[in-house]
Every structure is written in structure tokens, then in C-alpha cells.
Image: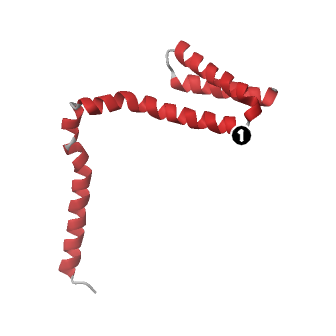
Amino acid sequence: MPDLGYLISAIVLAGLITLLLRALPFAILKPLRTSRFVQALGRWMPVGIMLILAVVVLRDELVQRPGQAWMVAAAAAVTIAVHLLGKRRALLSIAAGTACYVLLLNLL
């Protein structure tokens, strides 16, 4: 059985490490807010992530249903049109494109 002092020092040390690891992001947050690089990442990362997700989903659908590529293209066009005409509401455009694709798959 370990000594009581050893156990207490281990608990205190673990608590300090946890506190420091939780405080570290807040300590470096202020210099990062003024960084032009971080501001550029904040502008472009959401778009880049959405583009990667769209490419992966579209590619998978085209591979699974090669004869129905027009359905994928039509649903993508509806998504883009609703997004641009609907004041760039992402949830609305995704729902419209998904509904269009599901309807095309089930009705044709």
C-alpha cells in the first residue's frame, strides 16, 4: 500500500495538471484573436469542410448508382439554388436537396 503522503501528492499533482491543461486555451486565446492567420482560418475552414463533405457524399452516391447520376446532379442543383436564393440558410438548402434526392429515388 502506498504511503498517504504519496497518494495526496499524486492527487494534487493530477489536479494541477488538469487545471493547467484547462486554462491553457484561455491563456493563448487573446493573442490568437488578433492573428490574421487564425482569422483567415475562421473564414475559410467552414467552407472547406462543407466542400469536402459534399465531394465525399456525391462521389459515394455516384459510385453506388452510376446510372442515376442525373438524380445526384439535380439534387445538388436544388441544394445550391435554395441556398443562394434562400438567404444562405444552410439547414433549408440541405433539407431541400435531401428531399429532392429522396423523392427522385423513390418516384422514378
User: Which of 61/24 is in front?
Assistant: 61
Residue 102: give x, y in percent of width and height.
72, 30
Residue 38: give x, y in percent of width and height.
28, 33
User: Residue 97 occupies which quadrant of the picture?
Assistant: top right
Which image quadrant: the C terminus? top right
Residue visible at 36% across and 27% down in the picture: 43
User: Which of 24/105 is in front?
Assistant: 105
**25 is higher (above) or lower (below) than 106:** below
Q: How many marks?
A: 1
Q: According to the image, label 1 marks what residue? A: 64
Residue visible at 20% across and 67% down in the picture: 12
In the rendered structure, which amino acid carries the disc numbered 1? Gln
Residue visible at 19% across and 44% down in the picture: 27
| Number of other residues with Cα within 10 Å of mark 1, as a class: few under 14, some 14 to 19, many 20 or more | few
**49 is higher (above) or lower (below) than 24:** above
Extreme residue in the right direction:
108
Would you say 97 lies left or right of 33 here?
A: right
Which image quadrant: the N terminus? bottom left
Residue visible at 51% across and 21% down in the picture: 89
User: Residue 46 occupies which quadrant of the picture?
Assistant: top left
Residue 58: give x, y in percent of width and height.
62, 33
Q: Helix or strand or loop: what does disc 1 sit on?
A: helix
Extreme residue in the bottom direction:
1
> Which of the colour schemes (rainbow, by chain, secondary structure, one colour) is used?
secondary structure
Would you say 5 lies left or right of 41 here?
A: left
